[in-house]
Amino acid sequence: MFESTLERDFITTLEFDSKVTSFDVQPVQIEWFDKNGKRRSYTPDILVKRKTRSGEETVLVEVKYRSDLEKDWADLKPKLMAGLRYAKQRGWKFKIMTEVEIRTILLKNAKFLMPFIRRGADREGDMTLIDNKLKELRQSTPKALLEQLAYSDWDKAALLPTLWYLIGTKQIRCDLYGAQLNMNTPIYWKP
């Protein structure tokens, strides 16, 4: 599904980006001719569709480490230019994403939440309990919410994985972009 850990990390951020409507890995093969007239092909990494203020945009993405871009620029430039032309012909954007744009707070939060999502919620009753209390409060923090729901540290700890699951599956809203998740992160009921 991915060729590098950087691509894996980018896909993880796409899964958590609320503006992304869909993405496709290695979506197209682009044919182009090099400076000697020899036919070449290039397969960009990912095609992303995202919501914008004016509708939706499509972005063809190449994922590369900055060091690889610098080291291999002479070889990469012609195929990246072919990708840019291909995207423009279709009314798409073309972007090169590096570790600077990918390895962000969103990625840290996504990696933290993924195990809770994969595990799933243990008990439906816990989900209902958390949802009803947050609906009543409208806004809280994980720490304050758990204090409202349970008296013992043991009971709070038992509810915490379900709370992280609800945040990870976007059933509870919070800002995954601004700061690393913690027990004092503002969380909001999602109507």
Image: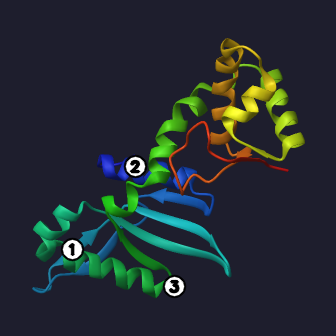
- Name the secondary structure under disc 1: strand
The CA span between labels 1 and 2 is: 28 Å
Is 180 rendered above or below residue 57? above
Query: Which residue is located at x 26 percent, y 70 percent?
Result: 41
Picture colour scheme: rainbow
Residue at which label 2 appears? 9
Front position among marks 3 and 2 = 2
The CA span between labels 1 and 3 is: 23 Å
Residue 150 screen position, x and y as percent: 77, 20
Task: Report which quarter residue 72 is drawn in.
Answer: bottom left
Numbered tag placed on residue 91 in the rendering: 3
- Name the secondary structure under disc 2: helix
Q: In this view, does 115 lie to the left or right of 46?
A: right
The CA span between labels 3 and 2 is: 27 Å
- Name the secondary structure under disc 3: loop
Q: How crowded is mark 3: few (under 14 residues within 10 Å), some or many (20 or more)?
A: few
Q: Residues within 10 Å of mark 2 (few under 14, many from 20)?
A: many
Is 154 rendered above or below residue 186? above
Residue 98 screen position, x and y as percent: 31, 63
Is 98 rendered above or below residue 88? above
Q: Which of marks 1 and 2 is nearer the N terminus?
A: 2
Task: Report which quarter residue 64 is drawn in.
Answer: bottom left
| Nearest to the observer: residue 41 or residue 12 | 12
Is 28 rendered above or below residue 171? below
Task: Report which quarter residue 140 is drawn in.
Answer: top right
* Amino acid identity at mark 1: Arg
Query: Mark 3 and mark 1 in contact (Cβ < 8 Å)?
Result: no
Residue at which label 1 appears? 40
* Amino acid identity at mark 3: Gly
Front position among marks 1 and 3 = 3
